[in-house]
Image: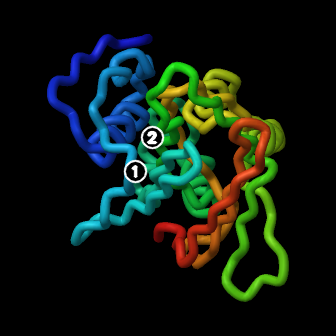
Amino acid sequence: PVFAIVVIGVSSRRTIGIIATIAVIAGIELSTAWISSCQCGAAAAEPAVAGDSARRVLQDGLSLELAPLPHEQTRAFLVARGFPEADARWAAERGCFFRSAIANSASAVNAPSIDIALGAWRVTAAGAATGKPPLTREGWEGEWRARAVGEAAAVAFHWALFPTAQTFAPTDHNWGFLTFDLPAGTRFALDIVWRVDGREATARIDDLECAR
């Protein structure tokens, strides 16, 4: 179901990320319309604060926030969607789940769209010579088929993940899990690629860590 949410006076992208994470864990599908009037600053990323595990990129039209999701939250989310306990624990331990909030930071109507394709991103574990793409919806579908997971649970999980590819018009936002297919506690770098106005842009986030 889609719930109408009225947010008054939201001025922090961090607050938006927290709201979105709560909604995903609770199984609420948010409409992006409620956030279209947010007066979030687009000139600079918010600095990290004590106890804040989120990492942020604000560059070339892209606004990205991501933070590791603890195993117990991931497991509980999956069990609530109908996954058997064993499958939920297996996914939580190997998936390296991060919650994400991604947006086109431009506000002008004639500003360029940005295009994101997760297949172009690279996840490079500490000490690894080469990287690999994140684990996408399509990759998880194969895993669930192999484990004979029920269709209803697999579909619910599909819609909780960030889309494999998406175009963002100015002020467009989306939220969902990003999964990096690494063992718990693994440190890694994430190379992010997107296109803005036909031009490729890149950014790197170093020293990320999968939750334990």
Instruction: Where is residue 75? Give x, y as percent.
Output: 47, 49
Task: Answer with left or right where residue 209 lies relative to residue 132.
Answer: left
Residue 30 or 146: which is nearer the viewer? 30
99 to 124, vertically: above or below? above
Which residue occupies 40% across, 23% down? 28
Q: Regarding mark 1 in the picture, which secondary structure is present there?
A: helix
Instruction: Where is residue 73? Give x, y as percent.
Output: 40, 50
Task: Answer with left or right where residue 180 lies relative to residue 37.
Answer: right
44 to 76, vertically: above or below? below
Which residue occupies 35% across, 24% down? 35
Give the amino acid at mark 2.
Answer: Phe
Give the amino acid at mark 1.
Answer: Gln
Which residue occupies 31% across, 11% down? 4
Residue 148 or 2: which is nearer the viewer? 2
Label 2 crowd bin: few (<14), some (14–19), many (20+), radius 10 Å: many
Instruction: Where is residue 141? Give x, y as percent.
Output: 77, 36
Residue 71 in view here: no
Q: Regarding mark 2 in the picture, which secondary structure is present there?
A: helix
Label 1 crowd bin: few (<14), some (14–19), many (20+), radius 10 Å: few
Instruction: Where is residue 205? Give x, y as percent.
Output: 57, 68
Tags 2 and 1 touching, CB below 8 Å: yes
Residue 51 in view here: yes
Task: Answer with left or right where residue 113 lies relative to residue 176.
Answer: right
Residue closest to the far bottom: 127
User: Which residue is denoted by mark 2 in the rendering?
Assistant: 77
Quarter where residue 72 is shown: bottom left
Task: Answer with left or right where residue 51 lies relative to residue 104.
Answer: left
User: Which residue is denoted by mark 1 in the rendering?
Assistant: 73
Residue 143 or 19: which is nearer the viewer? 19
Question: Disc 2 to disc 1, how far (Cα)?
Answer: 6 Å
Residue 129 or 153: which is nearer the viewer? 129
